Amino acid sequence: MLFPTLAFGVFFLFVYFTAWSLDRENGRRKIFLLLASWFFYAQWDWRFVGLLIASAVLNWGVAALIASSDSPGRRKWLVALGVALNLIILGFFKYYGFFVEQAVELLNQFGWERDAPLLQIVLPIGISFFTFQGISYVVDVHRGKTPPARSLVDVMLLMSFFPHLVAGPIVRASDLLPQFDRVPRLTREMAALGLLLIAWGLFKKTVIASELAVRLVDPVFFDPSAYGALDIAAATYGYAVQIYCDFSAYSDMAIGLAALLGYSFPRNFDQPYRAGSMQQFWRRWHISLSSWLRDYLYVPLGGGRKGLVSSCINIMITMLLGGLWHGAAWTFIAWGALHGAVQAVERVWRHFREGKAGLPHWLGVIVTFHIVCLGWILFRAESFDLAMQMLEGLTRMAPIMVLTPFLLALIIGGIAMHWLPPRAVEGLAVRVKEAPAITMGVLVGIMILLVEAMRPEGVAPFIYFQF
Amino acid sequence: MDPNEPKDPDEPAPFPAGAHDPFPPRGAELAPEVPTSAPDPEPDDRNDWIQSADAHDLPTREPRLKTLGRYAFPPEPPLDEEGEAARDRRWTSRTVIFATLFLLVFNSVSIQSWARQQEPGWITATVQQLSDVWTAQISQLGADQPREGVREAYETARDQRFPGQPDAPPPT
């Protein structure tokens, strides 16, 4: 059940009205939201609802044991156990096949040919997100940053809450658990922001991202050798816009849906393509993941506390694992390596040129954007061969085949939206919140009608569902 | 030198005092202004039931209908937090309902096409028949025209090609 579908719309209307009819009974309200979330998840594969429940029970139990233990050594063992169990779940479903294949290839090179225990494992949707949430909960309880949840229901709802369940943002326990303590308060501003974010997200996903994917990016990345430099460059820029509009649309809609139910999620994107360096880019792109990697991987590795070399090694490890988090493929690891290497170079550059003038900001933005686009080629291509074909094609002169004025306008518009006033939607919400309900309802209706009139038939799954 | 000593009338005075001074007098020497108008009259006694108002600036009598309205429908006391929350929830729910109704009228085609894409079954068949009837009725009123107009304009823009460019291949 995808967000931009009629089925989800009907589902959400039911959840919205039922949840607010239980506004005096927080416990029942949470149980209802939990059941609704499991129903939502079961639309993909009902068997994995059990995995979701097991994962929540595991994290709740480990966190409760940590909280009740007075021995620092025992607490350390328990947190290690909790993290390891989460990683085992993630590793089995997501990386088992990849690592077995790599091991078999390696052994074959040494002449040791054996039948490998290959399994066709179905990847549970959103597993990367809910296991990372579980890890952050256990670690935060161990660090004392968040108290253990009051009940198992809270942890289950934290990990299963349907707006963020399948593609984030990765909402931490310290953000969401306190909101579960009482029936949330819905203000007009929250509601207006939620409705506007949903409409804006629908537009970005179903119009911009879908059109670019279907008419430009997919054909060119499928067979780059059939296209010339202009089409390939357009497809690369188009993919940069597509992935931003696709993923940020999901985040916007998730934040908007949660807001309509009275809950506040953290911001996940902040105009990433206007970043003047790769470090800035990661402060603006998928913020919930980058801050997760910083707090639970980069800082525990030592961060930047042990000098420049250590800092560069740590950022490299963090980005490599960040790449692997996106998928079990060498192209994702190469993508992470590129981002890590560029950030390491930036650190060395800053270290040796401290106090001296750096690149002008506008030049930094252009350079960063093109490095990010280079990374997107690795990210999108099915294999290294196709990625290399894309790069080779950038020098091949041929007539334009698939790029049209409309697609060019979508690309330019998708990049230009990064220079809208920051927090533009929030500002608009403040302005429209005073409007009468009928005016606001018609306004939202018109926005959705425009999107519906423009969108292509059907809707592709969100890109980040596969992660 | 004795100041009482008689002066020689031919001796030129170093600072002639009797001559006309070309400069205007200094501020402190300015003559006091002559009032050009009569002094302000003493203010009237303030009205004793509206402390901050001057009786001359207010109508002497409130319209009777308004007075009656104030007594008949006294203003509600300000809402407490729970009251404000309930009011905001009502506003949101009404907004959602109005948006849904608006889309049911102007975007009924979406329900029809969604129903046609579902696997056949009792529920989907029922929804499909209902949506077919609803869409047909609504289109007779012309409520489908805005969506169709936007769609046509959008498709025209989407299918534009650069000069000399061959037609687009079908989308994948």
Image (tube, coloured by chain):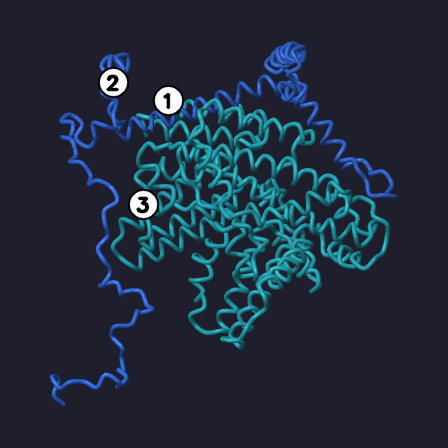
Camera-side residue of A325 and B52: B52
> Hue of chain B?
blue
Camera-side residue of A357 and A329: A357
Residue B112 seen: yes
Q: Quadrant of residue B143?
A: top right
Q: Point out residue A448 in the picture as x, y percentages from the top left corner.
A: 58, 28
In which quadrant is the N terminus of chain A drawn? top right
Q: Point out residue A352 in the picture as x, y percentages from the top left corner.
A: 53, 77
Q: Point out residue A175 in the picture as x, y percentages from the top left corner.
A: 38, 45
Q: Chain of mark 2?
A: B
Q: Would you say A315 lies left or right of B5 here?
A: right
**Dot 3: few (<14), some (14–19), or many (≥20) neighbours within 10 Å?**
many
Q: Chain of mark 1?
A: A
Residue positioned most to the front: B9
Q: Quadrant of residue A275?
A: bottom right
Q: Label 2 vs label 3: CA separation?
A: 63 Å
* Residue matched to label 3: A148
* Residue matched to label 1: A21
Q: Residue at x 70, y 27 (%)?
A: B151
Closer to the eye: label 2 or 3? 2
Residue A235 bears which disc, if any? none
Q: Residue A351, relative to residue B131: is it above or below?
A: below
Q: Residue at x 53, y 72 (%)?
A: A350
* Residue matched to label 2: B62
Q: Are marks 2 and 3 in contact (CB under 8 Å)?
A: no
Q: Quadrant of residue A156?
A: top left
> Hue of chain A?
cyan
Residue type at mark 3 is Pro
Residue type at mark 2 is Glu
